[in-house]
Amino acid sequence: MSPPETFSAACTPTASDALRERAPAKVNLTLRVLGRRVDGYHELVSLVAFAGMGDRLELLPGENLALTVSGPNAAEAGAGDENLVLRAARHLAERRPGLRVGRFHLVKHLPVAAGLGGGSSDAAAALRLLARANGMRLDDPVLHAAAEATGSDVPVCLAGRSSLMSGRGERVERVDLPRFGLLLVNPRLPVPTGPVFAGLALEPGDVLPGPDHPAPTRLPRERGELVRALAVLPNDLEPPARRLVGQLGAVAESIAATPRNRLTRMSGSGGTFFGLYDNCREAVAAAKIVAARHPGWWVKPTVLG
Ligand SMILES: C[C@@](CO)(OP(=O)(O)O)[C@H](O)COP(=O)(O)OP(=O)(O)OC[C@H]1O[C@@H](n2ccc(N)nc2=O)[C@H](O)[C@@H]1O
Ligand SMILES: Nc1ncnc2c1ncn2[C@@H]1O[C@H](COP(=O)(O)OP(=O)(O)O)[C@@H](O)[C@H]1O
């Protein structure tokens, strides 16, 4: 006689119960450093937008927190306790007793330590997934506190749309931007964020005279006008990043030389550079040229905004 049926597996979550979120690449269209705060962090103002490509994150809700990682850049991101997905989940669990967590699976497409905020975007996606699994609203202040505690770039990634980011990264104001074709190029050389900021050689309490940034309402909405406005608002981290990694100059030159390129600049602390184009088709044509000349580089055409 067969043992009595326990039906024990009937309510075990399966892969089809997983919640899914995109974790898009973050692009700093501008980045002005206004000074260095007494806590050692730099005071910034940065126009941030999101790409049409990035990582993907799934959550199978459950009682125990776990993470697996696959994809082309899985090894570089790692699945250990330091992964920003797990750090964000722990920061939220500390602030929200009884939080239902579960098993995350990250598909890591973005290069690591690349100025694209991949880890921050993964962390923000984890917070959005946990919010869904726990019936929390996305404007819940606890979610925002967990984002801030996880990293400077996580609040803007939690917003997940074009924004003017300021302070250490904790102030985020929505901005409407036109859509662009976008080319992302990384020479597969990781560039650590801390040493790039350190290259500015600012002391705590230093205030830089001059760097100013138009308010969100003063930014042009038309593509050509916006590009002209962006051209005079640099990324202040580009000079120290280029001093740290000499090969970055060649990345910028390769993008700037492509037909119909509107703007070439480094994102965040590098070493990814981006090119703006009027549409995705032009970005694809540019990608083919750069990839043919530099087969070892990470080259991705997509859209911005
Ligand atoms: C530079 C930016 C621009 O968007 O992006 P990435 O290049 O990392 O993508 C961000 O400010 C990075 O944000 P995030 O990568 O989250 O930084 P955190 O983990 O908080 O800090 C890493 C290190 O960067 C420095 N840091 C970061 C942010 C800031 N406003 N001032 C700083 O001085 C500090 O040395 C800190 O120890
Ligand atoms: N999910 C993750 N993806 C990428 N990097 C991660 C992740 N979790 C932790 N890290 C660590 O965070 C650091 C910054 O990575 P990343 O977010 O890719 O940098 P950047 O913001 O410059 O693109 C790296 O040193 C990496 O080891």
Image (cartoon, rainbow, N blue to C red):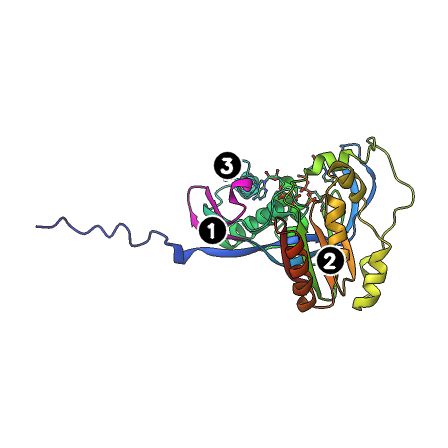
Image-quarter location of ligand 2: top right
Q: Which residue is mark 1?
A: 59
Res 241 visible: yes
Query: From mark 2 to mark 1, how far is it between C-alphas?
Result: 33 Å
Looking at numbered disc 2 in the image, what kind of residue is underneath it?
A: Gly
- Examine the image and state in which quarter residue 168 appears: top right
Picture coordinates of residue 8, whole percent (x, y): 26, 50
Query: Along the line of sight, which residue is nearer the eye, 140 or 208?
Result: 208
Looking at numbered disc 1 in the image, what kind of residue is underneath it?
A: Leu
Q: Which residues are magenta?
A: 56-77
Task: State the SS at label 2.
Answer: strand
Q: Is residue 101 magenta?
A: no
Picture coordinates of residue 44, whole percent (x, y): 79, 44
| Residue drawn where x is 87% and y is 38% of the image | 207
- Residue that extends furthest to the right in the rendered view of this protein: 209
Within-10-Å neighbours for mark 1: few <14, some 14–19, many 20+: many
Up the image or down, 238 lies above or below 244; here it is: below
Q: Is residue 65 left or right of residue 113?
A: left
Task: State the SS at label 1.
Answer: strand
Task: State the SS at label 3.
Answer: loop
Q: Which residue is mark 2?
A: 275
Q: Which residue is mark 3?
A: 80
Which mark is first along the chain, 2 or 3?
A: 3
Contact between labelled residues 3 and 1, with CB atoms less than 8 Å apart: no
Looking at numbered disc 3 in the image, what kind of residue is underneath it?
A: Gly
